[in-house]
Image (cartoon, grey):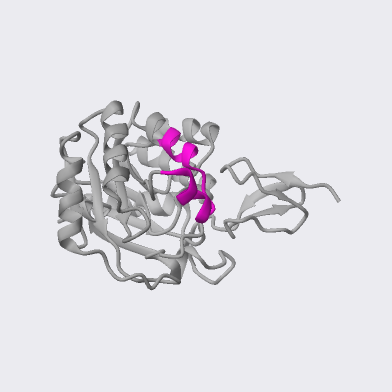
Amino acid sequence: MSRIACGICPHRCRLEEGEIGFCRARQNQSGRIVSLNYGKVSSLALDPIEKKPLARFFPGNFILSVGGFGCNLRCPFCQNHGISQVEATLPGEKISPEGLAKLARDLSAEPPGNLGVAFTYNEPFINYEFLLDTARLLRAANLKTVLVTNGTVNEKPLTDLLPFIDALNIDLKGFGIDFYQRIGGDFDTVKRTVEIAARSAHVEVTTLVIPGENDGEEEIAELSAWLADLSPEIPLHLTRYFPRYKSQIPATDPAALYRLAALAQKRLKYVYVGNC
């Protein structure tokens, strides 16, 4: 039986007929890879833009936030595991790209207003086709498209999509190959995503700081130095971890988080502490 390769992310899953990929959201159907997530909605809310978090992209405004199901990483500490680590075949509300774009337009015309659509809550790139179809409509309507992503995406789908993307918050889970191997990701791919996206869109970076895992001063110094080499004006969000999903590591000490933020501020202009 022939296998078909999915080209969205570095897993490059080779799927037999009917088989679902690592992300739980893409399937070989009759010899082509389709998104099981297309238009499926697990979460829909009008959020402050700062909640994405984006601190320096139209601050004080709201954005319609939408999520689906599934993820192409396996973080044991996932803060949204209820939608990211479940099957996209679960029942869920559906909306078309046209319907989502219309909702975004309608919300923009009434208080408190709406910038556009943020694809968030779970990994948006695994729902690539819906993302692209909607982003084109939003661009035509002069509305913004925002991605909150783990950055685990191949270069071609990324560069094909970026002309329609206005801002990204990219999770940099840790600053090392070993850390990414433990969560089923690829460190170099995520770094490349940050580099490419920052050339054409507003980019902010988030690291969830986990005690004993990615909270070393040397690691944060290396991370902030690397970002500063791209641009010292890329905002970095260091956020407090809480025990979730399969991880029972105690929550991050706020004092330690602020010390790491002060260290990052030696290289970066904008460093924010979150979840404290």
Compared to residue 172, the image places residue 211 above or below, namely below
Q: Nearer the viewer, residue 138 or 260?
A: 260
Instruction: Tell me where residue 242 sits by quadrant.
Output: bottom left
User: What's the residue at 33%, 49% (across, down)?
Assistant: 117
User: Can see residue 130?
Assistant: no
* Percent position of residue 47, x then y: 24, 58
User: Can see residue 236?
Assistant: yes
* Percent position of residue 33, x then y: 67, 48
**Number of numbered discs present?**
0
Q: Nearer the viewer, residue 76 or 44?
A: 76
Question: Is residue 193 shown left or right of residue 9?
Answer: left
Is residue 212 in the magenta section? no
Q: Which residues are magenta?
A: 176-193
Which SS does the magenta portion mostly show?
A: helix
Locate the C terminus and report the quarter of the image it occupies.
bottom left
User: What's the residue at 30%, 41% (across, down)?
Assistant: 144
Compared to residue 229, the image places residue 111 above or below, namely below
Question: Is residue 162 shown left or right of residue 144?
Answer: right
Q: Nearer the viewer, residue 205 or 89?
A: 205
* Percent position of residue 99, x then y: 42, 54
Compared to residue 184, the image places residue 221 above or below, namely above
